[in-house]
Amino acid sequence: MNGLRIILASQSPRRKQLLEWAEITFDIMVQSTAETFPADMPVPEVPVHIAREKAIAVRQKYESLHDTNNIIIAADTVVVLGTTIIGKPKDREDAIEILSRLSGNKHQVITGVVLLKGQQEIAFADITDVWFHPLTREQIAFYVDKYQPYDKAGAYAIQEWIGVVGIKSIQGDFYNVMGLPVSRVVTELNKLVTNQGK
Ligand SMILES: Cc1cn([C@H]2C[C@H](O)[C@@H](COP(=O)(O)OP(=O)(O)OP(=O)(O)O)O2)c(=O)[nH]c1=O
């Protein structure tokens, strides 16, 4: 992109695949973070806060990323049921319990995205509403045992069997649920490229 180097600050294979599908050329650089947030932080701000931590951690780790020829992209996806943030399941029992709560209900998937270029920052959150069909205990146990969704926020992946048979409808960006609202990311990247040098 016009001599700019794009860095994806994520170890998520889904985010890598989504940026590849968008025909973006990029490198991956990662630094783990605590992924913590203040207890009183409003829920929609949480994934942006965590994404910012991921982006800054990578920028701090690699000195060369401070200059304005680099754009760092980081993201964080959370599932929100009512006012409760549901992260990744701790174990099998937790995954089954989470999916039992999502079954037959609507929840939100919020992905926070932060792009850093020198001192410039673009940060936003994208929200997708997801409605699950009622799921049987057998369906939930089958999914958890076969697909092991322990690295997925909300204990499921929309791009897997449970999304194919268990999701009634969504409102918003499908790819946002997978972990990155790619079309918005491309729009924001283009803005940073247009502002090059600033
Ligand atoms: C809800 C949902 C989540 N997910 C994934 C997207 C994210 O990878 C993951 C949420 O965890 P995140 O903490 O957002 O990301 P990550 O730990 O996988 O990667 P990194 O922090 O290095 O960027 O859940 C799906 O793949 N499909 C889905 O339907």
Image (cartoon, rainbow, N blue to C red):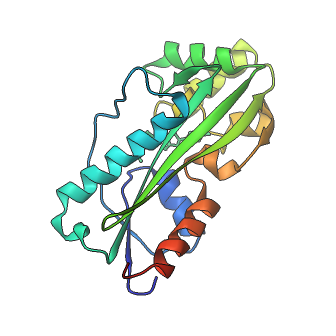
Residue at 59% x, 18% y is 98
Residue 67 as seen in the image, left or right of residue 9 = left
Residue at 36% x, 82% y is 197
Where's residue 175, x and y in %? 64, 52
105 is higher (above) or lower (below) than 160: above
Residue at 19% x, 70% y is 64
Q: Quadrant of residue 144?
A: top right
For the C terminus, which image quadrant? bottom left
Q: Quadrant of residue 162?
A: top right
Residue 109 as seen in the image, left or right of residue 10 = right
Residue at 60% x, 46% y is 178
Where's residue 61, x and y in %? 18, 56
155 is higher (above) or lower (below) than 187: above
Where's residue 179, x and y in %? 55, 47
Nearest to the observer: residue 164 or residue 27: 27
Where's residue 114, x and y in %? 44, 54
